[in-house]
Image (cartoon, rainbow, N blue to C red):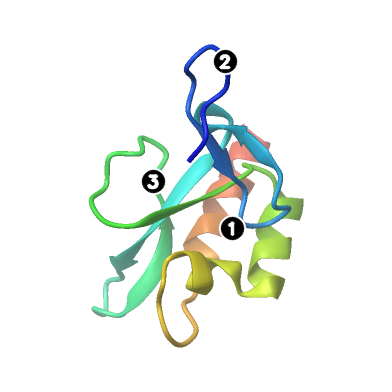
Amino acid sequence: MGRVARGRPVRTCVGCRRRATKSELLRVTVRLDADGRPTVAPDPSATAPGRGAHVHPDRACYDLAVRRKAFNRALRRGGALPADAVGEYLDSLSTT
């Protein structure tokens, strides 16, 4: 990943494909849900282990990432992964 002049890490949003500083994006990872199935989950503290992907914390970029199946590709997972938990998290941000 590239870095800007001030040494701040830069990542690419899997939805819109624009580059932004890591602090501007929401990291998502694969976690097991209550039934033991893998799902895409938000990682706002960016501390969860494993491969992560980044998305702008707005519904438009999330919807674009889901439509393009970008979470599966970025997280290197075969098959469809539900990303509903990320959508619910973004909805909770907009209501507070």
- Is any part of residue 83 visible from this angle? no
Calculate the distance from the C-alpha at mark 2 to the C-alpha at mark 1: 33 Å
Answer few, some or many: residues within 10 Å of disc 2's Cα (few below 14, many 20 plus, some between 14 and 19). few
**Residue farthest to the top?**
6
The nearer-to-camera label among 2 and 3 is: 2
- Give the residue at mark 2: 5
- Give the residue at mark 3: 43
- Which amino acid does the dot numbered 3 rest on? Asp
What secondary structure is marked by label 1?
A: helix
Q: Would you say the residues marked 2 and 3 are in contact, meaning their CB atoms lie under 8 Å apart?
A: no
Calculate the distance from the C-alpha at mark 3 to the C-alpha at mark 1: 13 Å
Give residue 76's position: percent from left, percent from top: 41, 72
Give residue 65's position: percent from left, percent from top: 65, 63
Answer few, some or many: residues within 10 Å of disc 1's Cα (few below 14, many 20 plus, some between 14 and 19). some
- Which amino acid does the dot numbered 1 rest on? Gly
32 horizontally vs 25: left or right: left
Calculate the distance from the C-alpha at mark 2 to the C-alpha at mark 3: 26 Å
What secondary structure is marked by label 3?
A: loop
Give residue 71's position: percent from left, percent from top: 53, 67
Give the mark, 2 or 3, whose residue is nearer the N terminus: 2
The nearer-to-camera label among 2 and 1 is: 2
In the picture, which quadrant includes the C terminus?
A: top right
Answer few, some or many: residues within 10 Å of disc 3's Cα (few below 14, many 20 plus, some between 14 and 19). many
- Which amino acid does the dot numbered 2 rest on? Ala
44 horizontally vs 60: left or right: left
- Give the residue at mark 1: 87
**Residue farthest to the bottom?**
79
Q: Which mark is residue 4?
A: none
Give residue 23's position: percent from left, percent from top: 51, 27
Give the mark, 2 or 1, whose residue is nearer the N terminus: 2
What secondary structure is marked by label 2?
A: loop
On screen, residue 9 above or below 64 = above
